[in-house]
Amino acid sequence: MAVDGRSVAVQQFLKKTELIKQGAEARVYRGIFLGKPTILKERFPKLYRHPLLDEKLTHRRTVQEVRALLRCRKAGISAPAVYFVDYTCHCIFLEDIVGSVTVRDYITSIQLSPQKSQEERLDHLAKKMGLVLAKMHEEDVIHGDLTTSNMLLKVGGDTEEADLFLIDFGLSYISALPEDKGVDMYVLEKAFLSTHPNTEALFEKLLKAYTASYRKSHSVINKLNEVRLRGRKRSMVG
């Protein structure tokens, strides 16, 4: 029998787990599911919304997230495996990428290392990010919340050989529109430069790898530049 809308599978998982993140949209737990290290993402009701509308929107978000993850994995893009989905309580059981660090933390650690080794390692990372994002947009997946915190890098080996995982597809959707892809890259640029100051040249290298890898990148970059211009105009007005 379900308690508070949670299925037996969710109840059992939550008995031996830890809450690792509480966001505006969901709670994220870490534990073991069917003997595997697992992340559970649980979307909770928004009390300020009408219950029927909230249920519809939350269900759609859950479906879109699962669809984006499966689409990425099918295309060979590294993303967490989906172990189980409970659409009744809007819970997704995902692979826990053990032995990984966020790209945000990785960049910070590199910047604290000796100057001599920084540039080459960061260049490899920027190229890898550009290649992965190009592949994601080839599949018409819009992430919706691209930040260096939503990318994981497997620890071990050098950056060139490391595996880059995309995570947290909670705002994702499917779209072939260049503008949506341009906005996706703009969100990343804003997050990237605010989190990692003085890395404008590094982001341009990311864009260069993205452009070289994605045959439809020209229209996306045009849209990115349009969004950049609108953003600068808003800043000037403000």
Image (cartoon, rainbow, N blue to C red):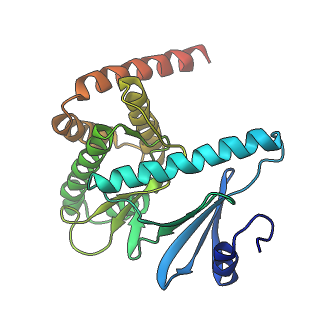
The quadrant in which residue 236 appears is top right
Q: Is residue 161 above or below residue 234?
A: below
Residue 99 visible? The answer is yes
Q: Going 21% across and 68% down the picture, which residue do you hit?
A: 158
Closer to the camera in the image, 65 or 103: 65
Q: Position of residue 144 (x, y in %)?
A: 49, 40
Q: Horizontal and vertical percent for residue 32?
A: 54, 82
Q: Is residue 37 above or below residue 64?
A: below
Judge from the rendering whether residue 58 lies leftward or rightward of residue 97; answer left or right: right
In the picture provided, is 81 more to the left or to the right than 23?
left
Counting every numbered tag in the picture gives 0
Q: Using the rendered view, name the quadrant where residue 161 is placed.
A: bottom left
Work out which residue is located at the far front of the displayed protein and give it: 1
Residue 64 location (% of width, % of height): 51, 45
Q: Using the rendered view, name the quadrant where residue 29 is placed.
A: bottom right
Could you tell me which quadrant the C terminus lies in?
Answer: top right
Residue 201 visible, this angle: no
111 versus 59 height, above or below:
below
Tell me what residue is drawn at x 31 percent, y 26 percent. Answer: 220
Q: Would you place residue 71 above or below residue 236 in this image?
A: below
Name the one closer to the observer, 68 or 144. 68
